């Protein structure tokens, strides 16, 4: 069995993505991740000091849940990932907070290119803006207006080639959000959630050739 994989030993910005701004927080993690955690921008989820997404107080809260679910092997300013990639919808740090709609639109191709390069099986958008964008762009079921994050939290939505599990912004978590996310990710990992196509039928021989 042969599977297509990205070959790189870089954890921070493994594909050398370049955002059109002076300061940005690059994607971080496993270039062959099964799980892609998508935040909003550094002003919400941190990382300007560390260069790593989700390293402010709210981000550490999310890291703890991801670790309990087995998606991180260790938390901190340089978390040890386990088949997981962390990035932002809008990686640039701007004086304007929140960024303008035009700024999100300008950076969307950078985000999309990295998302498709990672080709994770599961997208985990964090917060309302990231969730709305992921549902609109990568599923057939976009949110009607502002997404109801409480009902969407840790619940599976089937996307176009992805599973989507939205996450309430960790800055707004109560006593149940951590456990609901850990339980939801645990249940998912107990199933055959990976979405791969076997292109071996187009090749001579009987060997499988799996792509995401």
Image (tube, helix red, strand yellow):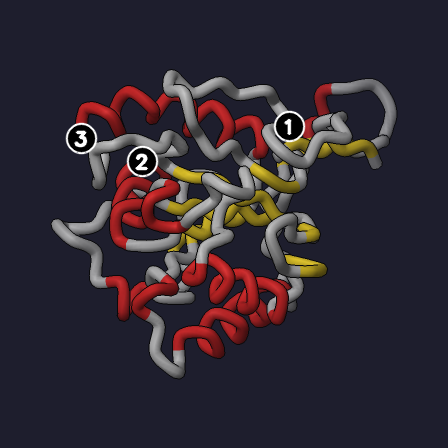
Left or right? Give the position of 176 relative to 137: right
Residue furthest bottom as drawn: 175
The residue at 51%/32% (across/down) is 26
Query: Which is nearer the eye, 132 or 205?
Result: 132
**Marked residue nearer the N-terminal end (1 or 2):** 1
Q: Circle 2 is placed at which residue position?
A: 137
On the rendered structure, is 86 left or right of 154? right
Considering the numbered disc 2 on the image, is that residue within a helix, a strand or a loop?
Answer: helix
Assess whether mark 3 and mark 2 are in contact (beta carbons under 8 angstroms). no
Q: Is residue 200 visible?
A: no
In the depicted structure, whether residue 202 falls above or below residue 61 = above
Residue under the point 27% across and 40% down: 136
| Residue bearing the label numbered 3 | 101
Question: Residue at 57% across / 41% down in the picture?
Answer: 120
Res. 14 mark: 1
Above or below, comparing residue 170 to residue 18 in the picture: below
> Do callouts 3 and 1 mark residues in contact (Cβ within 8 Å)?
no
State which mark lies toward you, 2 or 3: 3
**Among all residues in the image, which is located at the extreme left?**
145
Q: Residues within 10 Å of mark 3 (few under 14, many from 20)?
A: few
Cα–Cα span, label 3 and label 1: 27 Å
């Amino acid at each position: 069995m042969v599977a297509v994989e990205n070959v790189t030993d870089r954890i921070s910005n493994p594909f050398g993505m370049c955002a059109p701004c002076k300061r940005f927080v690059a994607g971080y993690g496993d270039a062959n991740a099964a799980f892609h955690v998508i935040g909003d921008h550094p002003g919400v989820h941190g990382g300007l000091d560390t260069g790593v997404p989700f390293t402010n107080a709210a981000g550490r809260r999310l890291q703890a849940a991801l670790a309990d679910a087995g998606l991180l092997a260790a938390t901190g300013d340089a978390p040890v990932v386990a088949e997981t990639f962390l990035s932002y919808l809008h990686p640039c740090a701007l004086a304007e907070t929140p960024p303008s709609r035009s700024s999100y639109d300008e950076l969307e191709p950078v985000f999309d290119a990295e998302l498709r390069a990672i080709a994770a099986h599961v997208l985990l958008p964090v917060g309302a803006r990231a969730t709305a964008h992921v549902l609109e762009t990568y599923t057939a079921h976009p949110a009607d207006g502002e997404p109801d994050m409480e009902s969407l939290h840790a619940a599976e939505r089937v996307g176009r080639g992805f599973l989507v599990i939205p996450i309430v912004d960790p800055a707004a978590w109560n006593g149940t959000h951590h456990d609901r996310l850990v339980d939801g990710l645990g249940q998912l990992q107990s199933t055959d959630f990976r979405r791969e196509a076997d292109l071996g039928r187009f090749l001579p021989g009987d060997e499988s050739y799996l792509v995401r």
